[in-house]
């Protein structure tokens, strides 16, 4: 009799121990430097931007929106094609309520509280509530919601991997988080080790949203700006920009005459087909269309006179890499453009396809980088 009782007792203890381990609180330090204790598993989550859904999909691919009870903006704001795939494979995603618009001041704290989330995942400093929104933090905290700040925008070179690690821990997806982090680190180390050997650093101008806004907004200290230096270039906006982005004149570009020009393309295939001016990349775009879209924008005299355009060193990169855990693709692209001989073996588009094939339950569409054709333009 004793062995049988003993067996049941041991089994019971193991079950209890397993349950306790799964339900145990965890402590993390978020990207705002805040220590947060979270009771796991987390069943109710709100996110500040729909663009975080690909990150959730990386960590929980069989159910990317598991536990998501609200978000500020829909995924369609930045990736309408991916939202269609999301809705087709995971129809419940269509029912996630929104609690704001495209800015932090559009957010309704009352709506968030009504959703009764255990956890809110916000960006450190992006379009949604940030770490400086003290009143909102206090209100949500008082309502029982834990808040964790992540970041792929303010300082992506230093904050991308910690952000993935934090969410992997919270969601019980440490294995997937570590696997992606290992991949990311390997790609990053390849670039850093080679850049360490370069003798000269070409000058680069990184222009945000070419064709969407008046010329010429440059990225410098923040977002994709630091990727220029990381890829072995010299960002000409660094010395004159007062922050992450600043507007520069066409005369500034002509005077500096950078060796390489890169534009972050926010145009869509529909805008391209309509003949609109924003440089386009992403879903539905082909390599030829991307080159044509870029050539259209750069055909005006002030750009056509740049050495970068005349020598075929003018390029476009998908704008949404600026706030994405997949920004390693942009860094690889920068490296191939700034030091083409040193990084001839890298193929950013193949890296993007590999990320989708390995980690995401979606199919990639379109191209995410382009180069101007100098023949005839």
Image (tube, rainbow, N blue to C red):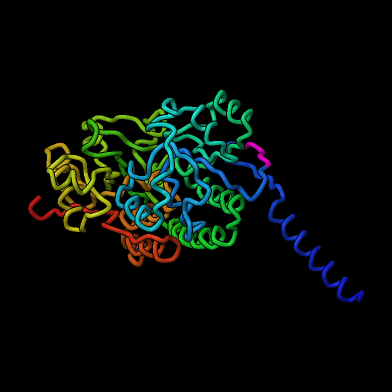
Residue at the farthest front position? 1
Residue 238 position within the rendered picture, expressed as x and y whole percent measured from the top left: 39, 36
In this view, 340 is above or below 203: below
Name the chief secondary structure element in magenta: strand
How many marks overall?
0
Q: Is residue 178 visible?
A: yes
**Left or right: 320 with respect to 150?**
left
For the point 36% across and 38% down, which residue is it? 219
In this view, 56 is above or below 143: below
The quadrant where residue 28 appears: top right
The quadrant where residue 218 appears: top left
For the point 31% across and 49% down, which residue is it? 318
Along the line of sight, which residue is nearer the eye, 120 or 188?
Answer: 120
Along the line of sight, which residue is nearer the eye, 288 or 309?
Answer: 288
Along the line of sight, which residue is nearer the eye, 28 or 39?
Answer: 39
Residue 124 position within the rendered picture, expressed as x and y whole percent measured from the top left: 51, 36
Q: Please check the rendered image and state whether residue 281 is part of the magenta-colored stretch, yes or no.
A: no
Q: Is residue 305 visible?
A: no
**Left or right: 11 with respect to 345?**
right
The quadrant where residue 205 appears: top left
Residue at the farthest right position? 2
Residue at the farthest top position? 135
* Numbered range of the magenta stretch: 33-37
Q: Quadrant of the N terminus?
A: bottom right
In this view, 133 is above or below 318: above
Residue 17 position within the rendered picture, expressed as x and y whole percent measured from the top left: 77, 59
Residue 52 position within the rendered picture, expressed as x and y whole percent measured from the top left: 45, 46
For the point 49% across and 59% down, which residue is it? 189
């Amino acid at each position: 009799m004793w062995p049988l009782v003993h067996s049941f007792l041991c089994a019971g203890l193991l079950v209890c121990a397993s349950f306790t381990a799964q339900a145990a609180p965890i402590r993390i330090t978020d990207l705002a430097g805040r220590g947060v204790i979270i009771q796991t598993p987390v069943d109710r989550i709100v996110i500040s931007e729909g663009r975080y859904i690909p990150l959730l999909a990386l960590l929980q691919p069989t159910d990317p929106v598991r536990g998501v009870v609200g978000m500020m903006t829909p995924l369609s704001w930045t990736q309408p094609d991916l939202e269609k795939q999301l809705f087709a494979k995971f129809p419940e995603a269509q029912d996630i309520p929104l609690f704001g618009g495209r800015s932090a001041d559009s957010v309704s704290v009352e709506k968030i509280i009504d959703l009764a989330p255990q956890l809110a995942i916000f960006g450190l400093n992006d379009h949604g509530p940030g770490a400086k929104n003290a009143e909102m933090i206090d209100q949500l905290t008082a309502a029982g919601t834990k808040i964790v700040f992540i970041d792929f925008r303010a300082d992506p070179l230093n904050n991308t991997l910690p952000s993935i690690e934090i969410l992997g821990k919270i969601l019980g997806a440490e294995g997937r988080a570590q696997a992606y982090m290992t991949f990311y680190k390997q790609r990053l180390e390849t670039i850093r080790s080679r850049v360490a050997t370069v003798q000269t650093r070409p000058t680069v101008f990184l222009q945000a949203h070419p064709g969407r806004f008046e010329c010429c907004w440059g990225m410098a200290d923040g977002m994709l700006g630091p990727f220029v230096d990381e890829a072995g270039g010299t960002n000409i906006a660094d010395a004159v920009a007062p922050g992450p982005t600043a507007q520069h004149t066409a005369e500034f570009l002509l005077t500096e005459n950078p060796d390489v020009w890169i534009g972050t393309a926010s145009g869509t295939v529909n805008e391209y087909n309509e003949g609109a001016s924003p440089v386009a990349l992403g879903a539905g775009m082909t390599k030829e269309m991307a080159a044509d879209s870029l050539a259209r924008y750069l055909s005006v005299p002030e750009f056509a006179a740049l050495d970068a355009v005349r020598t075929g060193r003018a390029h476009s990169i998908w704008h949404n890499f600026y706030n994405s855990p997949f920004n390693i693709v942009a860094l690889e692209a920068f490296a191939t453009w700034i030091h083409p001989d040193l990084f001839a073996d890298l193929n950013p588009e193949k890296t993007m396809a590999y990320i989708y094939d390995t980690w995401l339950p979606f199919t990639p569409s379109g191209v995410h980088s382009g180069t101007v054709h100098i023949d005839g333009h």
